[in-house]
Image: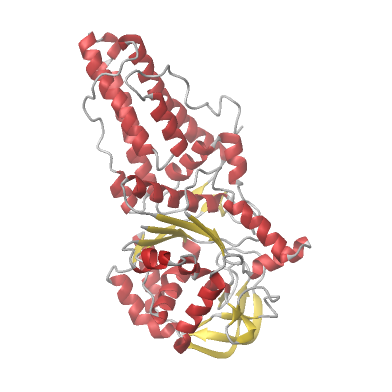
């Protein structure tokens, strides 16, 4: 499976919304690797945006300095968030990206033409709109732009795109987003501007082949990364031959990925992605988390304060498949304490303590399975919260089993059956938990390993008790 995230602008440091998509992609990658499937997980940064140029101007630093610094911050999320991406592309620095964009431009040449264009442009979205205000909530007024641009004949691909999605060859999840895309397509597609004047772009970006007065529109440039990052044999392996190619993204950019990108690929004669998985937004006080809104939550600061397990678990356990999720540190602390400290940590510690107390630490044979874990089905539906709940069914069933069997009241023979069941439930929990919380899963596995268990130690600190989040 070829799994990609969107590549964010680097006009500022990453926020929690970026972490959400990265963690979701990481869960998919780890889950499919655990099943023995070949996986490539790719992410990166969109360096060639006008937003980046304006941010550098506002800060009084060269564009290259700002882009390099902030792109490094995005790539630096790997360790703190326990990410396992295989490839990280920067569109201004990857050696093959510009040449790849130029190849796609030339391959679509029959669908390109020039004409004068006027419209209202949102720098925050890097997109034209027929009227204001910006639907994504960017505060800056839309700019009236009048210039000669290159256009792509998107209208030529209306029927092909509709059939592609209706047939399921391009799967869009959830269904509400699929219906939204179909409605947009079937209302009629206009040709789209795919270049900007080099003067307005301050000379930053990839020049249009054969026309240095224009630079390639940042979205056309950025979308190409899914191919341009694949060098040599990787292109054939992961784009031509791979049967499952899935893009993860937020709902605000679905039009680019589900309409413009497939049309570009059809025009260029390239293979198509097979899946588009869309998440909604994280909010703070009901407002979308964004750099421009100034309400960002810093994932590095949150990991520093509460640990990676708490941050990943909140993103996976609390964010619904459909609908925005409002973030507060208090909610993160409450979920971590309830599930990780009181639920998982207490279970493993309790089981290990009883094994040492009643069986001198020796692990008896496995007993019955306590829960039918439905993780595969949930992740196939791109429902991370349902998948997390499915894993948690093991914790809940194991705790109920303890109360039902009461090993402290049993005979030695009965204890061997019940504690064998519980130890092996904890071992299965470590396996199932690994894609979601790799660090926590490793601690659980270490706590119940071997024929004789290690002495029990607390697995999670209680965040509220320590005063965190207050």
Q: In the shown orientation, is residue 331 left or right of residue 365? A: right
What percent of the width, then of the height, locates residue 43?
A: 50, 58
**The quadrant where residue 10 appears:** bottom right
What percent of the width, then of the height, locates residue 186?
A: 37, 78
* Colouring method of the image: secondary structure
One can see residue 63 in this view: yes
Q: Residue furthest front?
A: 232
What percent of the width, then of the height, locates residue 315?
A: 48, 45
Residue at 46% over, 85% down: 153
Q: Quadrant of the N terminus?
A: bottom left
Q: Quadrant of the C terminus?
A: top right
**The quadrant where residue 391 appears:** top left
Q: Is residue 279 above or below residue 272?
A: above
Of 366 and 458, nearer the camera is: 366
Number of callouts in the render?
0
Q: In the shown orientation, is residue 424 left or right of residue 238? A: left
**The quadrant where residue 290 appears:** bottom right
Q: Is residue 184 above or below residue 7?
A: below
Of 52 and 386, nearer the camera is: 52
What percent of the width, then of the height, locates residue 463?
A: 55, 29
Of 378 and 94, nearer the camera is: 94
One can see residue 286 in this view: no
Q: Residue furthest right?
A: 60
Residue at 57% over, 76% down: 217
Q: Is residue 308 above or below residue 173?
A: above
């Amino acid at each position: 499976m070829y799994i990609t995230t969107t590549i964010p602008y680097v006009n500022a440091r990453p926020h929690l919304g970026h972490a959400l998509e990265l963690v979701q992609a990481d869960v998919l990658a780890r889950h499919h690797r655990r099943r023995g499937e070949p996986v490539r997980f790719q992410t990166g940064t969109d360096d060639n945006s006008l937003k980046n140029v304006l941010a550098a101007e506002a800060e009084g630093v060269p564009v290259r300095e700002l882009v390099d610094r902030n792109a490094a911050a995005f790539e630096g999320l790997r360790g703190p968030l326990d990410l396992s991406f295989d490839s990280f592309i920067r569109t201004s620095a990857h050696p093959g990206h510009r040449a790849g964009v130029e190849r796609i431009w030339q391959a679509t040449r029959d669908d390109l033409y020039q004409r004068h264009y006027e419209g209202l442009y949102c720098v925050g979205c890097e997109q034209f709109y027929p009227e204001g205000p910006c639907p994504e909530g960017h505060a800056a007024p839309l700019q009236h732009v009048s210039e000669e641009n290159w256009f792509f004949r998107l209208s030529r691909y209306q029927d092909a795109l509709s059939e592609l999605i209706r047939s399921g060859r391009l799967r869009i999840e959830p269904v509400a987003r699929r219906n939204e895309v179909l409605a947009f397509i079937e209302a009629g597609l206009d040709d789209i501007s795919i270049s900007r004047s080099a003067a307005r772009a301050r000379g930053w970006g990839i020049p249009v082949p054969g026309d240095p007065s224009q630079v390639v529109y940042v979205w056309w440039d950025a979308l190409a990364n899914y191919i341009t990052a694949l060098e040599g044999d990787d292109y054939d392996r992961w784009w031509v031959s791979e049967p499952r190619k899935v893009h993860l993204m937020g709902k605000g950019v679905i039009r680019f990925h589900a309409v413009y990108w497939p049309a570009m690929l059809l025009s260029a004669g390239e293979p198509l992605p097979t899946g588009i998985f869309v998440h909604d937004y994280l909010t703070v006080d009901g407002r979308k988390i964004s750099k421009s809104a100034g309400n960002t939550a810093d994932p590095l600061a949150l990991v520093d304060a509460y640990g990676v397990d708490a941050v990943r678990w909140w993103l996976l356990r609390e964010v619904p498949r459909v609908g925005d999720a409002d973030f507060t540190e208090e909610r993160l602390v409450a979920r971590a304490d309830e599930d990780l400290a009181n639920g998982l940590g207490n279970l493993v510690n309790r089981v290990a303590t009883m094994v040492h107390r009643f069986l001198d630490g020796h692990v008896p044979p496995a007993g019955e399975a306590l829960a039918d874990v439905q993780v595969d089905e949930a992740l196939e539906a791109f429902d991370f919260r349902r998948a997390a709940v499915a894993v948690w069914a093991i914790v809940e069933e194991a705790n109920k089993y303890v109360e039902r069997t009461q090993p402290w009241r049993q005979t030695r023979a009965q204890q061997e059956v019940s504690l064998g069941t519980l130890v092996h439930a904890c071992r299965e929990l470590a396996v199932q938990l690994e894609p979601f919380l790799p660090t926590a899963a490793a601690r659980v596995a270490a706590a119940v390993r071997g024929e004789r268990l290690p002495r029990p130690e607390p697995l999670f600190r209680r965040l509220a008790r320590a005063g965190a989040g207050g």
